[in-house]
Image (cartoon, rainbow, N blue to C red):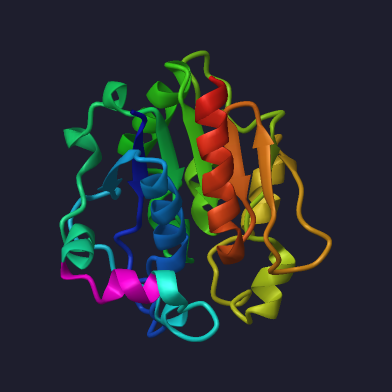
């Protein structure tokens, strides 16, 4: 049975001096977890540093705080999983068939330059596994290189939270960089839905990416399909 490595953030604020809290966008984890669980996949949660993963307050409000997210938050066992996430160094990538990067603006800070996450991603990919992300989770793929030195995303179709969506969410002045633009700079073939905030997911071989919080379920379903087609 396939094993999935879910990646979450350790960051709780936009920067060290900011009063603006951020964190894991809960539904991006819970929706995918539900899909993977329905398929009987084994799941583990890892973060750049291990330990607690704070929740993004905006993800705990209507309309994002839906039945799936609420069920997770009221389940002590599942909340405990977010208090004790694994450290990348404790993970053997050979044990996993897919890695799935969740989002929330917090990941813009601790995902891109995590050597541990890059190692896991590279080895899972090069062993024939699936690499996936949703929303800002694609920041975790920005700087990941393969063994031949090339960027994993170069020349591949990718989606993720669009700059237009940053503006509409009124956080364009808070974010540390334009993730969409940075992805394009790395040679990724970035694409997005015609309308903001609608579900949109892209599959390019074993690379599966979703655009925004509403895309988590679709992204997970495409991950399951990609695993079945390997």
Where 174 falls versus 136 (above or below)?
below
The part of the chain drawn in magenta is 69-76
- Residue 220 at x, y percent in the picture: 52, 47
Measuring 68% from the left and 54% from the top, which residue is drawn there?
180
- Residue 151 at x, y percent in the picture: 57, 28
- Residue 59 at x, y percent in the picture: 45, 76
**Residue 72 on the magenta span:** yes
Residue 143 in sight in this render: no
**Residue 43 on the magenta span:** no
Where 46 falls versus 195 (above or below)?
above
Location of residue 76 by image quarter? bottom left
Location of residue 68 by image quarter? bottom left
Measuring 66% from the left and 36% from the top, which residue is drawn there?
203
| Left or right: 143 as drawn, with respect to 48 | right
In the rendered view of the protein, which quadrant contains the N terminus?
top left
Measuring 64% from the left and 49% from the top, which residue is drawn there?
182
Location of residue 197 by image quarter? bottom right
Main SS of the magenta segment? helix
| Left or right: 41 as drawn, with respect to 79 | right
């Amino acid at each position: 049975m396939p094993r999935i490595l879910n990646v979450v953030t350790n960051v709780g604020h936009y920067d060290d001096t900011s009063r603006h809290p951020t964190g894991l966008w809960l539904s991006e984890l819970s929706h995918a977890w539900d899909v993977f669980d329905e398929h009987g996949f084994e799941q583990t949660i890892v973060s750049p540093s291990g330990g607690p993963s704070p929740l993004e307050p905006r993800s705990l409000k209507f309309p994002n705080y839906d039945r799936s997210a609420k069920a997770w938050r009221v389940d002590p066992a599942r909340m405990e999983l977010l208090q004790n996430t694994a450290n990348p160094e404790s993970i053997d990538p050979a044990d996993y068939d897919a890695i799935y990067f969740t989002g929330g603006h917090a990941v813009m800070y601790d995902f891109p330059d995590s050597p541990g996450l890059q190692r896991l991603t590279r080895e899972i990919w090069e062993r024939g596994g699936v690499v996936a992300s949703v929303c800002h989770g694609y920041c975790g793929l920005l700087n990941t290189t393969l063994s031949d030195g090339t960027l994993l995303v170069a020349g591949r179709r990718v989606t993720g939270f669009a700059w237009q969506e940053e503006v509409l969410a009124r956080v364009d002045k808070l974010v540390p960089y334009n993730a969409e633009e940075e992805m394009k700079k790395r040679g990724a073939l970035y694409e997005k839905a015609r309308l903001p905030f609608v579900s949109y997911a892209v599959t390019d071989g074993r690379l599966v990416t979703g655009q925004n919080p509403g895309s988590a379920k679709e992204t997970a379903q495409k991950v399951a399909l990609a695993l079945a087609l390997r």
